[in-house]
Image: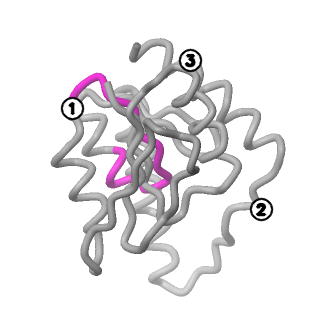
Amino acid sequence: MRIWIDADAAPTDVKEVIFRAAKRLQVETILVANRPVSAPANATTVRSIVVGQGADQADKYIVDQSEAGDLAITADLPLAGLLVEKGVYVVDPRGEEYSPATIASRLSMRNFMDEMRGAGMVTGGSPPYGPKDKKAFAATFDRLLTKAL
C-alpha cells in the first residue's frame, strides 16, 4: 500500500498531515508533480517524482503506477474518477472522499459547471483553504488510511 499525492496543488497543511502519518506508520508516500516538490528531510518513506511538463502528466503517472488499495490525495476530479475505477481510495484536500457511489455525480457537476463557465457565466471559485478544511481532511485521511492498511 502506498500513498500518492497529486502534489502540484496540494496545500502545505495537507502534506504535513500526510508526512506525519507516513513517518509514524512507515508507509511509502510519493509526491508527484511537474516541478520539484521537496519531501521533508526526516521523512525517510517520502519521495518526490518530477514528471515531464504538459497537461495531465502527473495524473497519468499516478494512474499508471497506483494499485487497488493504495490511497491518493487529489482535488482533480477526472484523476479521482480514474483512480476510484482502479480501486484506489481517494480523498480531496478538503476531506471529501471520492468513491464509486459519489464520483459519477461529482464528475457530472464538474462538467456542468465547466459548460456554464464556457457560456460566460460567473460561477465563483472555492473558498480559501482553512483550519476547518484541514480538520476534515485529517479525519477522512485517517479513516481511509486505516481502511487501506
Query: Which of the labelled discs sits on residue 128, or is there none?
Result: 2
The residue mark sitting in front, 3 or 2, is: 3
Residue at the extreme left: 64
The residue mark sitting in front, 2 or 1, is: 1
- Residue receiving disc 3: 143
SS for dot 2: loop
Residue located 65% across and 37% down the image:
17
Check if residue 24 falls in the magenta segment: no
Per the rendered image, the range of residues in magenta is 67-80
Residue located 67% across and 25% down the image:
139
* Three-letter code, disc 2: Pro
Please report contact status of discs 3 and 1: CB closer than 8 Å, yes or no.
no
Check if residue 68 falls in the magenta segment: yes
Q: Nearer the viewer, residue 147 or 27?
A: 27
Of label 3 and label 1, which has the lower sequence position?
1
Residue located 23% across and 39% down the image:
66
- Residue receiving disc 1: 67
Decide: few, some or many residues near mark 3? Use Cα within 10 Å; few <14, some 14-19, many ≥20: few
